[in-house]
Image (cartoon, coloured by chain):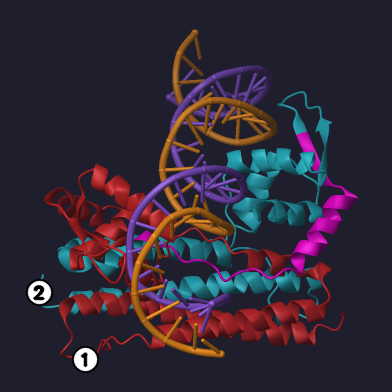
Chain colours: A cyan, B red, C purple, D orange
DNA sequence: GTATACTATCTGTAAAGTCATATATGGATA
DNA sequence: TATCCATATATGACTTTACAGATAGTATAC
């Protein structure tokens, strides 16, 4: 269960609630390499608390529902450090759109081109989101040590989106040229 | 359930057994964008047969265990055609190594560099595998129509691996330069 | 002769991820 | 006044994926 280790990492930076984890962390900060479902986050927090990796403190709010703020325990911090050094497998690729394209021979050209346009729009939106994340560039001398690692992961996200977009443009061109419709 | 649609596509090219699907199709042909577990393939085939998308014929072998050869039914072919035109979501990124790198601040430099070396080796191996797949290049006039689509998906796989590798080299350089160990 | 590997299908079990919805409060909008 | 949205946590039900092993015959290597 590697979601729990992502949560350990996030809580090692700052204690927060399940809601924050979803809306600030998984949707804003690390969305480009780890996405998590809200229900899964809450259930994983329960398990982690049971395992003694994190503890929670109820924060009473008056104008809003109460929050459960989770913090790392010593056990949790040790588990994070252990896990950070473990060997992780290469990512598994599983992309339905590529399945469609692989068998697109059986499809009218316009349908394929529509799909491609949609994916171009989607990847452009992602790229824009990533490029708007305010992190200093690598050549910045005033960079904090931790920001180097954050920037590196973000740079990969940006590079991958650019690779996708360049490839999608090639697809558009190639498929537009295919004589048989 | 999108594995079943990948299987529909594969069987639309050629009838085959679950074993062939695993060892020829999922491990050789479309491994760069869809990987499937053997147990999952067999169970999905059962469900697809129940749904009437495919039918099987027992092939008696004498020197080896018998095989169940699956073929598309008309229903299955219709379902494939329908699905090929549906909108598919952008891929979900979930890569444990990037989680590790994001929080690598807490790790000694040598450990990070080891991880990076391992990933370089892994991606180089993948790249080599992809480059050895015998498919004509896009500029080849003698290319079959279906091969255009196969080549396009393969080209993305190759481009992504190259992007990873270039980025990993940057990581190596940047982290090697970080003054604090 | 024994161990290992390949072909071939199938089952048990668990973990991981998805989708919908329930509950509750307060504020903004129509 | 009703509806929607944001905050906040939680549960039910399901699908998808992963990992390990059972079964069983043949072939190959040592």
Q: What is the number of the mark on residue A180?
A: 2
Question: Hey, which residue is sitting farthest right in the picture?
Answer: A74
Q: Chain of mark 2?
A: A
The quarter of the rendered structure image containing the C terminus of chain B is bottom right
Q: Residue at x 56, y 60 (%)?
A: B94
The percent position of residue B70, horizontal first and vertical second, equals 22, 58
Looking at the image, is B46 positioned above or below residue A29? above
The percent position of residue A52, horizontal first and vertical second, equals 83, 43
Q: Element at badge 1?
A: loop
Q: Residue at x 59, y 64 (%)?
A: B95
Q: Residue at x 68, y 76 (%)?
A: A137
The percent position of residue B163, horizontal first and vertical second, equals 51, 81
Say if residue A146 shows up in the picture: yes
Question: Is residue B98 found left or right of A178 in the rendered image?
Answer: right
Quick check: is A94 in the magenta stretch?
yes
In the image, the segment drawn in magenta is A68-96
Residue hosting label 1: B140
């Amino acid at each position: 269960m590697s979601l729990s280790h992502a949560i350990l990492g996030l809580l090692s930076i700052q204690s927060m609630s399940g809601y924050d984890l979803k809306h600030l962390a998984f949707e804003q900060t690390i969305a480009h390499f780890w996405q998590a479902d809200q229900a899964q986050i809450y259930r994983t927090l329960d398990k982690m608390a049971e395992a003694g990796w994190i503890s929670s403190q109820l924060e009473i709010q008056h104008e809003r529902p109460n929050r459960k703020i989770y913090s790392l325990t010593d056990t949790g911090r040790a588990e994070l450090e252990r896990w950070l050094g473990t060997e992780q497998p290469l990512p598994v690729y599983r992309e339905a759109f590529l399945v469609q394209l692989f068998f697109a021979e059986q499809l009218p050209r316009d349908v394929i081109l529509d799909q491609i346009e949609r994916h171009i729009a989607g990847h452009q939106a992602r790229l824009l989101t990533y490029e708007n994340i305010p992190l200093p560039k690598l050549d910045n001398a005033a960079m904090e040590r931790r920001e180097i690692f954050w920037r590196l992961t973000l740079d990969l996200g940006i590079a991958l989106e650019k690779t996708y977009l360049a490839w999608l443009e090639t697809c558009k061109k190639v498929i537009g040229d295919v004589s048989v419709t």
